[in-house]
Amino acid sequence: MIREIIIWPDPVLKQVAKPAERVDDGMRRLLDDMSETMYAADGVGLAAPQIAVLKRCIVIDTSPRQEGQKLVHLVNPEIVRTEGLTTYTEGCLSIPGEAEEVERAAKVWVRALDYSGKPFELECEGLLAIAVQHEYDHLEGTLFVDHLSSLKREIIRRRMKKLKQERAAERADAIKRAPGHESAL
Ligand SMILES: [Zn+2]
């Protein structure tokens, strides 16, 4: 099921997500919803807080932008090692239409539980390393705009607030235009 992606600024995106107790069918349904939502939005990664679920889980798929990669599920991820530095122009499904350069580790090693609940370790570089760090940030209540100057962040915040108002107005309009609106309770 495609879920609604929360747009920043929103208090839910600032919270620290809680570890998942186990990877059961409920968790797998959440992971499926997350990947479906990510693909529908043409994203390369999504963290559970972005659909208002404060659980430490992430889905990432950097293919075809990065050859040889595929869908990765990370439950309770931990970044155990980093190496080097790189900058990349990042966007975020919770901050649509915006992209800014952010400095990150060039290479990261992440430990997590997979879709079946089995622990594994993944060595990540290129876009995958960026995505892991970006999505991990979401679990800590941090967004890429938090890595920018406060001036840049405020400009983006204003644009996002305007976007949210426009979307709310469009939704209200659509409800008004819907047939049978007058009798709808
Ligand atoms: Zn994001």
Image (cartoon, helix red, strand yellow):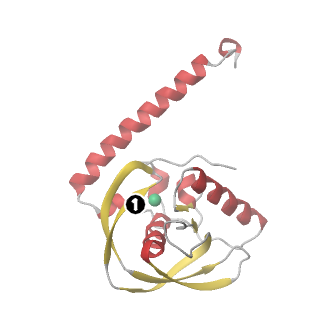
Q: Secondary structure at mark 1?
A: loop
Q: Is residue 52 visible?
A: no
Q: Which quadrant of the structure image shows residue 24?
A: bottom right
**Residue type, numbered disc 1:** Leu
x and y percent of residue 51 in the render? 57, 53
Q: Which quadrant of the structure image shows residue 17?
A: bottom right
At label 1, counting other C-alpha atoms closer than 10 Å, the crowd grade (few under 14, some 14-19, many 20 or more) is many
Compared to residue 112, the image places residue 50 above or below, namely: above
Report whether 51 appears left or right of 164: right
Please name the residue shown 50% across and 53% down the image: 12
Between residues 70 and 131, which one lies in front from this camera angle? 70
Q: Which quadrant of the structure image shows residue 18?
A: bottom right
Quarter of the picture containing the C terminus is top right
Report whether 108 appears left or right of 74: left
> Which residue of the protein is positioned furthest toward the top in this rendering?
182
Q: Mark 1 vs ligand 1: CB under 8 Å?
A: yes
Report whether 140 appears left or right of 115: left
x and y percent of residue 1 in the render? 70, 50
Report whether 147 appears left or right of 35: left
In this figure, which residue is indicated by the disc labeled 1?
143
Q: Is residue 143 visible?
A: yes
x and y percent of residue 94 in the render? 46, 51
The mark tally for this picture is 1
x and y percent of residue 21 in the render? 68, 73
Compared to residue 151, the image places residue 113 above or below, namely: below
Between residues 41 and 171, which one lies in front from this camera angle? 41
